[in-house]
Amino acid sequence: MTQLLRSRAELRAVLTSLPRPVGLVPTMGWLHDGHRSLIRRARSENRTVVATIFVNPRQFNRAEDFSKYPRNEARDVQICAEEGVNIVWAPPVDEVFVPGFDTTISVGAIAMPLEGAARPGHFDGVATVVAILFGLVGAEHAYFGQKDAQQVMVIRQMARDLALPTQVIACATVREPDGLALSSRNVHLRPAERAAAPVLRQALLAAAAQWRLGERSGEALRTMLRSTLAGVPLAQPEYVSVADALTLGELDRIEGTALLSLAVRFGSTRLIDNELLEWPG
Ligand code: PAF
């Protein structure tokens, strides 16, 4: 049975009666098959699964993006029930950021480039809310999508530095048949934008193919990413990156595992995606 809870007190009380280990799946709702895959992994590795649905105002650097974020709680709860989630915690804002709340968790270097540079304050909001969720749920495991690769790295750094016992587990990106990564934001794409959006994946795969053929110049791969995107006029790149997979520093030469990533606007919708180039051995 899935219990829908709103307050911190209810969450804590119900959790004490449920078996461990606990798997946490933090979400902002508008659940799709990517979330289902996180929940299924959590279900398979834990005796209790908690999903949270909270559109976190602190991680939107534009108020408009926050108000536009798609919401359908009844459908989300239904999906959680279908997937065997034990607790759905869908709190109001003041149960997360309690009155007088005055703490910001600001992760350092790993949060600075890419999404951190493009969306000032975004990762402070993410790290702060995830720390609260980790504290409240006290899960053994928490599950996040690899589509937001930098977010996973920021959360890992935060959990390690604050000695939070929750293990951060990254799960493979789930894609549409044409390669578009599932994202709650895809709903905002107009038909022509939706038709153009698989170019993110195509650009990543073209650059990855060059790398597999032996190309080791970061700039050559960035050029490949840019030129594939340039073939689709509706795609307005915000950044393309070929970075060290541990530090996210941009690479001149690829001499270890690298992360290709990009952020692209289609009209008013901003999409991101990435591909890991795993160094052999
Ligand atoms: O990835 C998301 O949906 C959000 O950033 C998260 C991790 C739920 C924090 O609000």
Image (cartoon, rainbow, N blue to C red):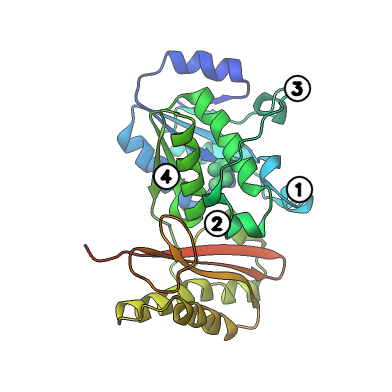
Query: Disc 4 on helix, strand or loop?
Result: helix
Residue 238 is at least partly visible in this image? yes
**In the rendered structure, which disc, 1 or 2, sits on the residue that comes first in sequence?**
1
- Is 15 situated above or below 177? above
Is the residue at mark 3 in contact range of ligand 1, meaning its CB lies under 8 Å from it?
no
Q: What whole-number distance in Å separates the C-alpha atoms at marks 4 and 3?
A: 33 Å
Residue at numbered disc 2: 183
Q: What whole-number distance in Å separates the C-alpha atoms at marks 1 and 3?
A: 23 Å
Circle 4: residue type: Leu
The dot on residue 104 is none
The dot on residue 100 is 3
Question: What residue do we see at 46% from left, 52% from top?
Answer: 34
Q: What whole-number distance in Å separates the C-alpha atoms at marks 1 and 2?
A: 17 Å
**In the rendered structure, which disc, 1 or 3, sits on the residue that comes first in sequence?**
1
**In the rendered structure, which disc, 1 or 4, sits on the residue that comes first in sequence?**
4
Is the residue at mark 2 in contact range of ligand 1, meaning its CB lies under 8 Å from it?
no
Circle 3: residue type: Gly
Residue at numbered disc 1: 67
Residue at numbered disc 4: 38
Question: What residue do we see at 42% from left, 13% from top?
Answer: 17
